[in-house]
C-alpha cells in the first residue's frame, strides 16, 4: 500500500478545517474552481429530505451560489442518491462551459444543462442511514478521464466518512460532558485559573481540577489547553 494511502487512512482529523486541504488537492487535480460538500438531512420520503452545504470555497458569493445550485439541481440530486451512485455531471449556460468524460460517459449521469453559469461534477456518497450526500466540483470547463473520476469518487467517500466521524465524536463528547465540566471549561477558556473557577462556582480547587481533568479525558485531549480548544471547536463553549 502506498505511503500516502496509509497516511490518509491512519490520520485522524480534529476538525472540519482539516478537510479543506484535502478538498483543495482534489480541486487542483482537475483544475476546478470551486468545491462544496452537501449532506442529506431529514428522514422519510425523498421529498422530505434536504441538502445542506457543510463545506465550500465559494467565498463572498456563497449564499447566492448555494441557493442557485440547490434550486437548479437539489431535487434531482436527492432523487438520484436513492437510486444510484453514478457521478452526476452537467454543462453550464455558455456553449463552451462543459463537463465531459469521453471514456467514462456510460458510468455517469447527466443533469439538465444550461441552468448555471458553470459546469460541474457531483460525486454521490451513501454511507447508510446517515452520512449521505455529495462532493461537488465546478469549473468553466472539465475534461475528466475515467481514472480521475474513480480517484475523486474514492476520495469523496473518505471526506464524507471523516465528516461523519467528526459528528459522532462530537455527539459522544456532548453526551459525556456534564454541566459542571462544561462550566469549568468555559471559565478556563475565559482565562480563569482553578482558584478563580472554584470561587465562581462555589467548589473546592480540588473538585474544579477533577472536573477539568475528566473533561480533558472525555475530549481525548492531552492537556487542558487542547481540551478548551476542542470544546470551542465542537461548540460546547464559546
Image (cartoon, rainbow, N blue to C red):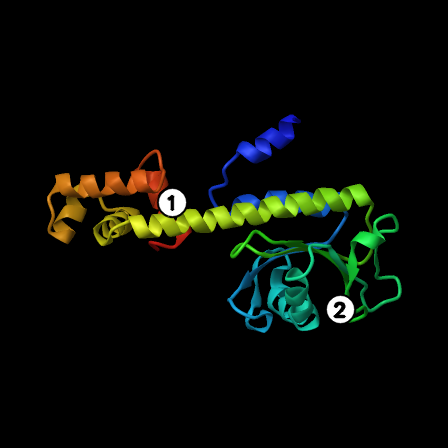
Kindly tell me whether residue 69 is visible in this rendering. no
Q: Give the quarter of the figure containing the N terminus.
A: top right
**Quadrant in which residue 3 is drawn:** top right
Return the disc, 1 or 2, that comes first in the chain's sequence: 2
Percent across and percent down for residue 236 are 34, 54
Q: Nearer the viewer, residue 118 or 52?
A: 52
Q: Position of residue 58 (x, y in %)?
A: 64, 59
Position of residue 26 relative to residue 128, above or below, is above
Q: Residues within 10 Å of mark 1 (few under 14, many from 20)?
A: some
Q: Which-is-in-front pick, marks 1 and 2?
A: 2
The secondary element bearing badge 2 is classed as: loop
**Relative depth, front residue between 164 and 81:** 81
Vertical position of residue 102 compared to residue 9: above or below: below
CB atoms of marks 1 and 2 within 8 Å = no
Q: Is residue 70 above or below residue 221?
A: below
Q: Is residue 50 above or below residue 27?
A: below
Residue pointed to by mark 1: 229
Residue identifier under label 2:
116
Q: Determine crowd level at label 2: few under 14, some 14-19, many 20+ residues with C-alpha closer than 10 A.
A: some
Residue occupying image coordinates x 74% and y 51%: 32
Q: Secondary structure at mark 1?
A: helix
Q: Work out whether residue 101 can be spotted.
A: yes
Image coords of residue 148 (percent x, y): 77, 43
Amino acid at each position: 500500500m502506498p505511503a500516502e494511502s496509509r497516511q490518509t487512512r491512519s490520520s485522524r482529523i480534529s476538525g472540519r478545517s482539516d478537510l479543506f486541504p484535502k478538498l483543495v488537492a482534489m480541486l487542483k487535480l482537475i483544475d476546478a474552481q470551486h468545491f462544496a460538500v452537501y449532506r442529506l438531512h431529514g428522514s422519510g420520503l425523498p421529498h422530505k429530505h434536504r441538502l445542506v452545504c457543510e463545506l465550500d470555497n465559494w467565498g463572498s458569493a456563497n449564499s447566492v451560489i448555494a441557493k442557485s445550485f440547490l434550486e437548479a439541481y437539489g431535487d434531482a440530486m436527492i432523487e438520484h442518491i436513492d437510486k444510484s451512485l453514478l457521478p452526476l455531471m452537467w454543462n453550464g449556460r455558455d456553449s463552451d462551459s462543459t463537463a465531459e468524460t469521453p471514456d467514462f460517459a456510460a458510468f455517469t449521469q447527466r443533469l439538465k444543462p444550461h441552468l448555471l453559469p458553470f459546469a460541474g461534477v457531483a460525486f454521490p456518497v451513501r454511507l447508510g442511514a446517515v452520512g449521505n450526500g455529495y462532493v461537488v466540483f465546478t469549473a468553466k470547463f472539465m475534461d475528466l478521464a475515467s481514472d480521475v473520476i474513480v480517484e475523486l469518487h474514492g476520495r469523496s467517500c473518505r471526506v464524507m466518512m471523516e465528516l461523519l466521524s467528526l459528528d459522532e465524536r462530537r455527539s459522544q463528547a456532548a453526551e459525556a460532558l456534564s454541566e459542571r465540566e462544561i462550566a469549568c471549561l468555559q471559565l478556563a477558556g475565559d482565562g480563569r485559573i482553578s482558584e478563580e473557577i472554584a470561587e465562581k462556582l462555589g467548589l473546592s480547587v480540588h473538585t474544579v481540577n477533577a472536573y477539568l481533568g475528566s473533561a480533558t479525558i472525555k475530549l481525548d485531549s492531552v492537556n487542558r489547553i487542547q481540551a478548551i480548544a476542542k470544546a470551542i471547536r465542537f461548540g460546547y463553549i464559546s
